[in-house]
């Protein structure tokens, strides 16, 4: 049995741009690993055969995300959470606020 670092076998990536990274949680499905984000642009690797969706939700229960777009298309929340199918080269933008408020975390 051999093991590998998850990043070594992550063969695809997407770009996630977020205004306030502390206000959002992004999790890869399949491996249920959280994505570490910083404010601004992030290149996020994933396994194209296992981590096929992202689960996105506010870091603080009861808060909401202002807007989420995937490849320029607005996404709809389900009970304040987003479940998005992803593929190599995707561009995801997460706006936690409309720009007039500071971080809420």
Image (cartoon, rainbow, N blue to C red):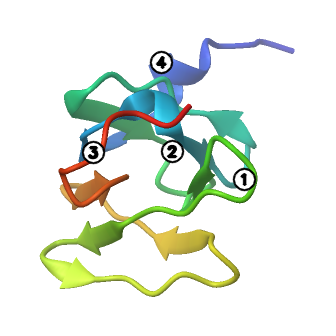
Q: Position of residue 2 (x, y in %)?
A: 77, 12
Mark 4 or 3, closer to the camera: 3
How would you rate the neighbour count of disc 4 (Cα within 10 Å): few for under 14, some for 14-19, many for 20 or more? few
What is the total number of numbered labels drawn onto the structure image? 4
Q: Position of residue 50 (x, y in %)?
A: 63, 54
Q: Position of residue 95 (x, y in %)?
A: 29, 55
Q: Which mark is residue 85?
A: none
The residue at which mark 4 appears reads as 8
Residue under the image location 26 percent in, 71 percent down: 70
Q: Which mark is residue 30?
A: 1
Q: Answer with mark 2 or mark 4, whichever residue precedes in sequence.
A: 4
Give the Cα distance between marks 4 and 3: 20 Å
The residue at which mark 3 appears reads as 16
Q: Answer with mark 2 or mark 1, whichever residue precedes in sequence.
A: 1
Mark 1 or 4, closer to the camera: 1
Mark 2 or 3, closer to the camera: 3
How would you rate the neighbour count of disc 1 (Cα within 10 Å): few for under 14, some for 14-19, many for 20 or more? few
The secondary structure type at the circle numbered 2 is loop
Side (left or right) of 34 relative to 39: right
Q: Answer with mark 1 or mark 3, whichever residue precedes in sequence.
A: 3
Residue under the image location 75 percent in, 51 percent down: 61
The secondary structure type at the circle numbered 3 is strand
The residue at which mark 2 appears reads as 47
Asked whether disc 1 touches disc 3, contact meaning CB atoms under 8 Å apart, the reply is no
Give the Cα distance between marks 2 and 3: 16 Å
Q: Is residue 23 above or below residue 1?
A: below
Give the Cα distance between marks 1 and 4: 16 Å
Relative to the observer, which residue lies in front, 8 or 28?
28
Q: Quadrant of residue 82?
A: bottom right
Asked whether disc 2 touches disc 1, contact meaning CB atoms under 8 Å apart, the reply is yes
Quarter of the image that includes the N terminus: top right
């Amino acid at each position: 049995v051999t093991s590998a670092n998850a990043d070594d076998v992550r063969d695809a990536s997407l770009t996630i741009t977020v205004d306030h990274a502390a206000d959002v949680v992004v999790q890869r499905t399949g491996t249920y690993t959280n994505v570490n984000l910083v404010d601004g642009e992030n290149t996020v690797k994933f396994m194209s055969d296992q981590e096929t969706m992202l689960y996105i939700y506010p870091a603080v229960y009861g808060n909401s995300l202002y807007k989420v777009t995937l490849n320029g298309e607005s996404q709809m929340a389900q009970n304040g959470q987003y479940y998005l199918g992803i593929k190599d080269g995707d561009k995801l933008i997460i706006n936690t606020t409309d720009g007039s408020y500071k971080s809420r975390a």
